[in-house]
Image: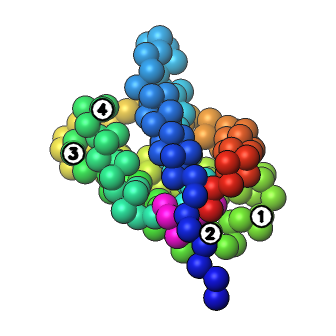
Amino acid sequence: MTITPHRGGFIIIATFILALILTILPLPEWARPFRPAWHSLVLIYWCMATPQRVGVGVGWLLGLIVDVITNTLLGQHALELAVTAFIVAKLHRRMRVFPLWQQAIGVFLLLMLEEIFSIIVMGAIHRPTPALSYWATPFIGMLLWLWISIILRDLRQRFKVN
């Protein structure tokens, strides 16, 4: 068994930072409900591509950062992203062999699970139920998956991230 050193950690961190910047980027009021979950999409990709490097711990830490920068209940996104990372880590071998359109369906289901967790947390802290446009985020993430997957795969190959 050959052990190769990990390379490309900077690229993984840079993509997470870019996703966090896109998460807090100001949008017009009408566009806010349609903001994709950039951090979730990037986490799903790296958990599928490099499960030995990006997993539940990274999902938890990323979720805590998202909680802080979006001013939500501390631990809300951390729970969602840790569960998402766990599911992707368990199913990464299966998900990687699917064509991109089938991966997009899996991503949609993962993003829906995150939204359901958010609704449960909102109910637990007695926040009002969000509008119907709240459910647009998983659909938008599913549509963006093709492009995000292609761009991140190109980065991974160009910088030889393993």
- In this rendering, is residue 158 above or below 68? below
Q: Quadrant of the N terminus?
A: bottom right
Q: Is residue 124 left or right of residue 133?
A: left
Q: Which residue is mark 3?
A: 74
Q: Nearer the viewer, residue 38 or 138?
A: 38
Q: Which mark is residue 98?
A: 1
Which residue is at a point 61% across and 40% down the rendered structure image? 141
Residue 64 horizontal side relative to residue 81, left or right: left
Name the residue beneath numbered marker 4: 69
Would residue 133 be visible to someone looking at this image?
no
Q: x, y (%) of residue 6?
A: 55, 64
Pointer 4 and pointer 3: residues touching (CB < 8 Å)?
no
**Residue with the most extreme top position:** 28
How far across and how far down the image is residue 21, in percent? 45, 28
Residue 49 at what x, y percent from top left?
A: 63, 61
* Mark pair 2, 4: CA separation: 29 Å
Query: What crowding class fits label 1: few (fewer than 14 Cα within 10 Å), some (14-19), or many (20 or more)?
Result: few
Name the main secondary structure of what is drawn in magenta: loop
Range of magenta residues? 48-54
* Helix, strand or loop at mark 3: loop
Secondary structure beneath disc 4?
helix
**Which residue is at a point 25% across and 32% down the rendered structure image?**
71
Magenta segment includes 51:
yes
Mark 2 / mark 3, whichever is N-terminal: 3
